Amino acid sequence: MRTAPENVRRVACVGAGVIGGGWVAHFLARGYDVTAWDPAPDAEQKLRRLVDAAWPALTQLGLAEGASADRLTVVATLEEAVVDAEFVQESAPEKLELKRDLLTRLDAAAPAGVVIASSTSGYPMTDMQTTAADPSRLVVGHPFNPPYLIPLVEVVGGERTAEDAVTWASRFYEVAGKSVITMNREVPGFIANRLQEALWREALHMVANGEATVKEIDDSITEGPGLRWAFMGPMLTFALAGGEGGMAHMLDHFGPSLKSPWTRLEAPELDKALYDAVVEGCDEAADGRTIADLVAERDRGVIDVLRATGRLPRQEDPR
Ligand SMILES: NC(=O)c1ccc[n+]([C@@H]2O[C@H](COP(=O)([O-])OP(=O)(O)OC[C@H]3O[C@@H](n4cnc5c(N)ncnc54)[C@H](O)[C@@H]3O)[C@@H](O)[C@H]2O)c1
């Protein structure tokens, strides 16, 4: 039996790393009971550390009534995690065979009808649902890091997913406070990752060719187009580049430059030199800040942006 999206109380999170842990934090903050399972021996400590680190940001965002980190139960087996779940979020490593086997096991263990969503960054569900006994309830629910702060989830089914499972998942995520794009067809990488990947490939080429440093690449976005993208996407932003003529003038004016060799798009070879340049560049850019420092800084920044763009109530200006 499938609980109505509005009535779901118990959520299972399977795989509790960066993304699974982020989902756990999100669902706890939204007042759900969360059961988690992860096979790594130190998974529970890591997960609780992640939830503790996220809690100040979540408190700032506003916790749902009754929300508490104490409503997290970490269990020893996959079966215990999902036995009475009303929704399952899978966030295991991005390996196709592993996802296929895990989704098959989750489908065998979860109550009939319960929707099971995968956090995959890019595999089409059609490729992951091949061995499950009931593929009709398997969907992709692709979040952004950290899932407890970035609103977007991309929802899409595979060839053997039932439409009502996709509809249910989209509604459930909305009730759970997410911003949902329901895709009507499968595309590897979905929408946002295809766009991110295009930028990422070009950035790697620029580092590999000595054309820009890691820091210059980051500054070019945070001091430039990134400021606009927080509230206006690349299409409308470019429409404004056409002045009063809007997108039509923009296309007439800059359309010919689409023929210019401005991007390479084929990914560069990730050889050791490029690998080291990117890792060392990030260490330099971090300038002594630890990953935990950067996570806290990012969380504060996202909350400030959400507030500044009217997606969260503004705080009283103390001045
Ligand atoms: N990191 C991101 O920014 C991001 C964003 C969106 C989606 N995703 C997707 O989320 C998923 C998880 O990625 P991540 O970044 O959290 O990785 P991660 O390495 O941080 O976490 C993966 C977790 O899965 C656990 N695990 C290993 N084998 C498992 C199994 N058989 N069953 C269940 N759990 C298992 C590991 O112990 C680990 O804790 C991937 O599909 C990834 O593509 C990642």
Image (cartoon, rainbow, N blue to C red):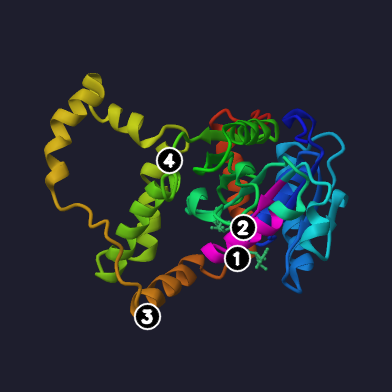
Seen at 79% across and 46% down, the residue is: 85
Q: Mark 2 highlights which residue?
A: 295
Pointers 1 and 2 in contact (CB under 8 A)?
A: yes
Q: Position of residue 17 (x, y in %)?
A: 66, 62
Front residue of this view, candidates 273 and 84: 84
Q: Mark 4 highlights which residue?
A: 227
Residue 99 is a magenta residue = yes
Pointers 3 and 1 in contact (CB under 8 A)?
A: no
Residue span colored magenta: 88-106
Which element type, helix, strand or loop, lies under badge 1?
helix
Q: CA distance from mark 1 to mark 2?
A: 6 Å
Looking at the rendered image, the quarter that the C terminus falls into is top right
Q: CA distance from mark 4 to mark 3?
A: 33 Å
- Among the two numbered marks 1 and 4 on one chain, the one whose residue lies closer to the N terminus: 4
Which element type, helix, strand or loop, lies under badge 4?
helix
Q: Position of residue 56 (x, y in %)?
A: 74, 48
Q: Amino acid at mark 4?
A: Leu
Q: Is residue 28 above or below residue 1?
A: below
